[in-house]
Image (spheres, rainbow, N blue to C red):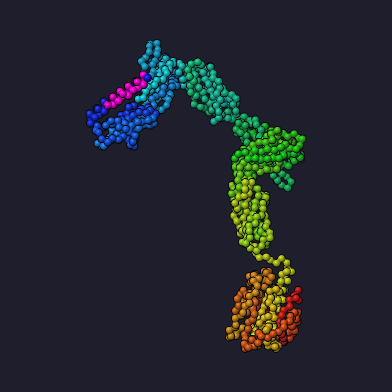
Amino acid sequence: MPGGVRGVGARLALVTVTLLLRCAAMAVGKPCFTVSDAGPVVRLGSSFIVYCFFKEQCQHSIYRDRKQVYDAWKHNSTSIAVHVRAITENQTYTCKSSCCSEPCGLDLLAGHPPDVPYKLNCIQKGQFGNITCTWRSGRETYIGTLSKLWVKAHGDHGTATPVSFPGSGSVTFPIFGLQSSYSVWVNASNKLGTAVSPTLNFTLIDIVKPMPPNIMRVHCSSWQCVLYWSIETGAQLLQVRHRPWHGNWTTHPFMEKTQKNYSISGLQPFTKYDFQAKCKLSPTQGLWSEWSTGISSSTDEEAPQTNLDVWYIEKSGGSEEKLVTVLWKELSESEARGRILGYEMMVEDSSGRGIAEYATNNSAGFSVPCSSCNITVFAYNAKGRSPLSHLFVSHQRAEPPQNVVCQPLSNHSIAIFWKEPATARRVKGYLVEWQSAEGSRGVVRWKRTAPGQLGTVITENIQPFECYRVAVHALYEHGMRGTNFTEAYSWQSAPTLGPTPSLEVNGHSVTVTWSWIPWEHRRGCLKSYSIYVTGLREKTKQYGPIGISKRRYTISGLSFGDYRLFITGRTAMGEGPPGDDKVFFISSQEVDHKEDLVFVKFSCLGLVLLALGCLLHASSVRHRVSTCCYCLLPDAVPDPANSTWAKECKSYKGQMMLKHNLDLNSSILSDEEPETVEIQEIQDIWEDSIGKSGGCNGTFLPSVENSWTGFQQRTLYKVQPARPYIKSFSQESDSSDGIEASKSTDMTPDYISSHGLLEQDSEELEQGQIVDFFPSFSSPFSGPLVPFEGKLTLDVVKVDWSNLD
């Protein structure tokens, strides 16, 4: 309660002072005055009232950071006020009056009073150096705060007057003459308060920190290094540390005797080391110096003490001799203990041909002839050679590990598991071998395990979207036996591109070959290929899956037409997009047997001869020449008995004499305009078989096609090319009455065989009369195809096909 009374009294006193200031401001002619009851500097988070006092009674307003405050209230007739609650930042208040254009305002600063300084500490740099004191100031005050270090020196001649040194967390000052002990403290203050740290008392011997030693040189052998230095006078302790180049530091116990050198042993040969040292004046008093500037040196070489990790791969070197490529892992710098100058091998063949020696500086490996042999390998440097590594290449029967399983573990690791071999022989250990499935992209890598260890994780050079070939080998006393390669991956997806095919068309089949999908598009281990073929009028057909070892495939039984072909690849994660597609064409189906071709040709020839016989019987009609030539199958030939010229033949009831040596060329080239031929449409199959393909029975026959085309072009008839059945074409001198009579005559048709036609042709050939019926026919039937002489009477013409078998 007394404290509350004091707070109220302070507020009343502040208001009283404020009113006096207002009166003073008004007296000098200012239109208004702004004040807070907490002062211009306030604590962050505090609440208070801001007042605006005006000279005249007008309309008043108050603004906070240029924004009008609407919750202000009227304090009296010439003042207004506003509550400020839990202030969080600096603010500006402006007071305005409608009676005067000149405003007044107040800038409020918000902050914290200083915290008590802590962790005050002082050191002397060197026995005669200056004293440096440091401390922590605590939280940020956000307002101007002044810190001072106060120092009071004590000695045999009394206490010196305290001296202050301004600073922000650190102050350095000289020693005070012969004074040996000191008292120091820190005072921090701002407009919101003052804070003082606890006092720190010390003597110079307690805070002295000597200068670090100076390592002048280092002398190293292969196993140890000796450091030589100079140290500050009076230092009684020394400490040294060392590390391999950019490795971890090893600190050695400090020495209590003053020495000018220090020996560090147990180092590795041919290794670069860093060295540092520090010192202290007394075991019980004073501080350790800083670590000296580092100095580096390397130990000497030694002969390697680690044997090479050796493996091999077999290659076919000749007819019977095999090449073995011996591989080894390079020794690390610490294992090599010097610069490796080369490698030597001794190969002892089991056939008793002796020992062959080889030398190489190739760090990757070396190939030697070996069918069954014992190989010894070692590396050497300037100081000596490494222990011998033995490799037995043997074809003795041994059992390999069983049930090898590969599982992805992460993007850069694969777990491998297996079971022991089904054998009673003692296994000396296992070796896991792996390499990229794209053999040209990666080297062979391997990892050894203990005899009882039936699993391991491989991480060396494992990358996502890469396919690897993994094998596990059981190692025996003399020889080894491994499993077949198994595909493995750390992460995969479907391929991003398919192969590009090459095509070779042969008849009704196509042979497809393709190259490997580029490795960057495989995205893992390929499982199979699929070939897709699409015809113009057919659905897409899939051929496959095709094993990845095959890159050649033949598709047979394709019909006539155009095709599009593409290939895709597949991994266990799905099928990828196709590669470039190829378009190819299968020509029309050829006749497979010569007998079928001969039969078709003779069938067409017989039909033509029958048609010519019909024309010969109609040749007695005066000044009329009728022609017909068909190459039709029996079911496509119209009945001649129903033709117009057959009915006309009946109306004349006389023998039709074929004019001797009738020349069609002269009649066709006469001045009279020939009549237009009437065309009768027949089945569409004719258009398909003759008009389009030009063959009989739908079969492609170039000779028949040419004959049909030549016949159409050379007879000069005015016909439509797609209408094969021509009724008649003539140059008439008869009256129209005769034609009408022939149309009205009834007659009963009989059939004449093809044999009768052939016999008639033979008789007329004997008489020596020749009729050039098709003078311009460039085909197998052109020229004087049917020579004859004499009469031919035919009451009715109808063809009997039964004798054509």
Q: Quadrant of residue 648?
A: bottom right
In the image, residue 6 lies in the stretch drawn in magenta = yes
Q: Position of residue 254 (x, y in %)?
A: 54, 19
Q: Quadrant of residue 204?
A: top left
Residue 79 horizontal side relative to residue 332, left or right? left
Residue 131 horizontal side relative to residue 531, left or right? left
Q: Quadrant of residue 602?
A: bottom right
Using the image as rendered, state which of residue 557 and residue 231 is in the foreground.
Answer: 557
Q: Position of residue 89 (x, y in %)?
A: 38, 31
Quadrant that contains the C terminus = bottom right
- Relative height, residue 572 to residue 11 (above, below): below
- Relative height, residue 202 to residue 362 (above, below): above
Using the image as rendered, state which of residue 339 and residue 685 is in the foreground.
Answer: 685
Using the image as rendered, state which of residue 266 and residue 501 is in the foreground.
Answer: 501
Quadrant that contains the N terminus = top left
Q: Position of residue 526 (x, y in %)?
A: 64, 47
Query: Can the viewer see residue 745 in this picture?
Result: yes
Which residue is found at the position 70% from the left and 76% from the top? 607
Q: Position of residue 101 (x, y in %)?
A: 26, 37
Marker count (numbered): 0
Query: Can the viewer see residue 518 in this picture?
Result: no
Residue 53 horizontal side relative to residue 474, left or right? left
Magenta extent: 2-19
Which residue is found at the position 39% from the left and 15% from the top? 153
In the image, residue 261 lies in the stretch drawn in magenta = no
